[in-house]
Image (spheres, grey):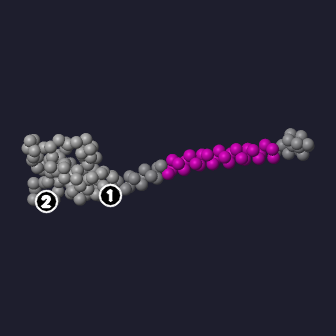
Amino acid sequence: MNGLQAIIATESWKIAIIAPTIVFISLSLLAVMVGVMEKAINYWDHFNQTLTQLFTRQEPPTQDRTEQKRLPDSPPEDHVLPLNEEERQTAQYLEMVVQRLGQPFTLDKLKTMAENMEVSHTPEHIERLQETGCIVESDDPEEKGLYYWRGL
């Protein structure tokens, strides 16, 4: 005797119906709980980010400061030496670093962040960009040691 014959012989229809029903309902509830937990975690993360943004001190954008102050004059065009391909590519990476740092910036921070991004020959390229006028020191005495990115 096996399968349906055993269920008929022992008259255990109730158990044969109730057991799979309990398993099905339990698995359905588990699936619903996992879905709700995912939404709850996403809500909690969003709530945490909102609180962090609300209570952290946000500095005013540094670009407004550069617009108010006059940038130092660049060297005359006849002194600008052309950049080779490697220097141009490094200048593009450094420009991204400067955008992240904000203007004005110090050369030490620029070198540190560029080296963290694994930009090769950073000090030499920064010196070269200073020669070409892409990076210029501020004329303002209050900003001694600070530099501006003028671009390629």
Image position, residue 35 (x, y; %): 56, 46
Image position, residue 82 (x, y; %): 17, 41
Residue drawn at the location 77% of the way across and 47% of the way down? 19
Q: Looking at the rendering, in which quadrant would you find the N terminus?
A: top right
In-front residue for pair 64/57: 64
Q: Looking at the rendering, in which quadrant would you find the C terminus?
A: top left
Image position, residue 17 (x, y; %): 78, 43
State the residue position of label 1.
56
In-front residue for pair 99/62: 99
Q: Mark 1–mark 2 contact, CB under 8 Å? A: no
Quadrant of residue 79 within the rendered picture: top left
Q: Would you say the magenta stretch is mainly helix, strand or loop?
A: helix
Q: In the displayed structure, would residue 108 be above or below residue 32?
A: below
Membership of 9 in magenta stretch: no
Image position, residue 144 (x, y; %): 13, 59
Please identify the residue farthest to the top as the structure is shown.
4
The amino acid at mark 2 is: Lys
- Is residue 60 something that shows in the picture? no
- How many residues crowd around disc 1 within 10 Å: few (fewer than 14), some, or many (20 or more)? few
The amino acid at mark 1 is: Thr
Residue drawn at the location 42% of the way across and 54% of the way down? 48
Task: Please provide the residue range marked out in magenta.
Answer: 15-41
Q: How many numbered discs sit on the rendered protein?
A: 2
- How many residues crowd around disc 2 within 10 Å: few (fewer than 14), some, or many (20 or more)? few
Q: Secondary structure at mark 2?
A: loop
Residue drawn at the location 13% of the way across and 43% of the way down? 80
Quadrant of residue 111 within the rendered picture: bottom left
State the residue position of label 2.
144
Q: Secondary structure at mark 1?
A: loop
